[in-house]
Image (spheres, helix red, strand yellow):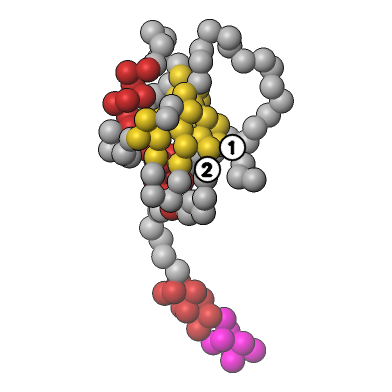
Amino acid sequence: MTSLIDVIFLLLLFFMLSSTFTRFAELELAAGGTGGGADNTSRPVFLRLSPERLSLNGAERTLVGLPAALKAQQRADGALPVIVALTGAVTAQRLSDLLATLRQVPGLTVTVLETS
């Protein structure tokens, strides 16, 4: 019985020393639900994301200048639907960087399309 307690304490010590207690950055993602009809007064903007390029409604943009360009297109109430299409082999890190940048602009409704 004594040796079992020693093994348990060694395992406890190992797991406590090998784990990290830091929080990583989190992105909130919402699953798509049933559609109740879109607001016809708001036209969505179209973002095309590729491994090297980013375009907003066909115009080339950078991640740094994207929030200012989106704020210029928002309605008076601040709402703006954004559709993101992925082209090529976009990495998860690139998509996460884009979503973190989009989170800086309040009032956006972001929809990420599936790749074909």
Residue 110 sits above or below residue 62 on the image = above
Would residue 7 be counted in the magenta stretch?
yes
Cβ atoms under marks 1 and 2 closer than 8 Å: yes
**Amino acid beneath label 1:** Leu
Q: Main secondary structure of the magenta part?
A: helix
How many labels, in total? 2
Q: Which residue is mark 1?
A: 113
User: Could you tell me which residue is drawn at 61 percent across and 87 percent down?
Assistant: 4
Q: Residue 49, how many percent across, how many down?
A: 45, 41
* Left or right: where 114 falls relative to 95: right
Q: Residue 67, how many percent across, how many down?
A: 32, 29
* Left or right: where 60 falls relative to 115: left
Q: Which residue is mark 2?
A: 86
| Alpha carbon separation for disc pair 1 and 2 | 7 Å
* Left or right: where 35 falls relative to 67: right
* Left or right: where 2 falls relative to 25: right
Rate crowding at label 1 as few (under 14), some (14 to 19) or many (20 or more) other CA atoms within 10 Å: few
Q: Earlier in the sequence, mark 1 or mark 2?
A: 2
Name which quarter of the figure residue 79 lies in. top left
User: Could you tell me which residue is drawn at 45 percent across and 69 percent down?
Assistant: 19
Residue 67 sits above or below residue 89 on the image = above
**Amino acid beneath label 2:** Leu
User: Could you tell me which residue is drawn at 64 percent across and 45 percent down?
Assistant: 116
Residue 26 sits above or below residue 13 on the image = above
Evaluate whether residue 103 shows in this view. no
